[in-house]
Image: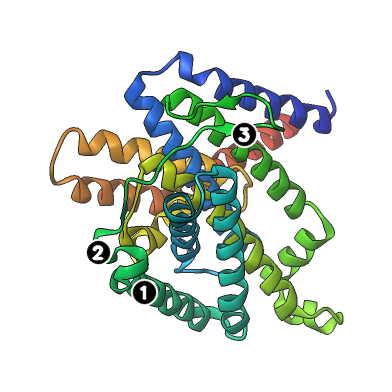
Amino acid sequence: MKPFLLQIAGWLALVGLLAYLPNLISAYQLLLYIEILIMALLATSFNLLFGYTGLLSFGQAAYFGIGAYACGLILMKVSPSLWLGILGGVIFATLSAATIGFFCVRLTGIYFSMLTLAFGEMVYAIAFKWYDVTGGDNGLVGVPKPAVSFFGLAAFDLAPPVHYYYFVLAFFIISIFFLRRVVNSPLGYVLRGIRENIERVGFSGLEVKKFQLIAFSIAGLFAGLAGALYAPFASTVSPQVVGWTKSAEPVLMTLLGGTEVFLGPILGSWLFLLLKDYIISHTEFWEIYFGVVLVFLVIFLPGGVLGFLGNLMAYLLRSGRTGE
């Protein structure tokens, strides 16, 4: 089978498995997998910056939180339309990312990372202190999950978790398809060039800062979409969703799965949340055990799980060809 057809078959199998998944798991696990899809979208948006552009952002949760707050505020105070809430969350997050990115891409290396962290903490402070709008440390409580209609047809009730799972899954598939096209487009190859050798890309006549800002804005867009989907799911939005600890999660998820493999952040999100849920169910000191596991994986699998499997497969193929 040709590699292209093999990839298509693999993607169709993955989509089919995700579509059938609610029939295989419990009600509690279904809620967990909704969160996994949302966080996988956040991690994949982060990896567009880190894995493909070489920009380590410590403030990706800011756009996740902005999307969540914007969607929640629209649903609670403007309109009960979930479409409008999601659109508003995406727009506010994208505009915020473009504005913050305008300043951040002027720095490189650790200075870029520290500036993204500083802006993230500014967003956290606004969410924590602006009681009249964000609810302060109480956050937004009681974010509704209204029914949606498609092209004026009968409304689709999202209250049952399985319905919201398929709603999130649809956004997830479309977003992953778009991000996949981005990384395999001429833009994606420019971003990889910036990651590998930023000076050479600049010498070729391309405006490096412009392409970095485009990547920053696209990453903010999909982080905002993930946040907008999260608000109705959790029915509450607190300042913790924009804090630096939340920004660390997509970093760890991406490192677990693999930074240079497109599916790496998705697998990493699955591993991260399932492992976290398993440890929490057995001990109240889950951070200690969870940290030990993460340290082990990062040290012994520096390329992530998928990176390790890819290297292992390549080694086995070379061994088979050479007869070793």
Closer-to-camera residue (171/321): 171
Q: Position of residue 213 (x, y in %)?
A: 67, 73
Give the mark count: 3
Looking at the image, which residue is at 39% across and 47% down?
297
Dot 2 surroundings within 10 Å: few (below 14), some, or many (20 or more)? some
Residue beneath disc 2: 137
Residue beneath disc 3: 170
Q: Position of residue 39 (x, y in %)?
A: 47, 46
Look at discs 3 and 2 and give the one toward the viewer.
2
Dot 1 surroundings within 10 Å: few (below 14), some, or many (20 or more)? some
Q: Is residue 182 left or right of residue 271?
A: right
Q: Earlier in the sequence, mark 3 or mark 1?
A: 1
Identity of the residue furthest to the top in this view: 23
Tell me the amino acid under the disc marked 2: Asp
Tell me the amino acid under the disc marked 1: Ile
Look at discs 3 and 1 and give the one toward the viewer.
1
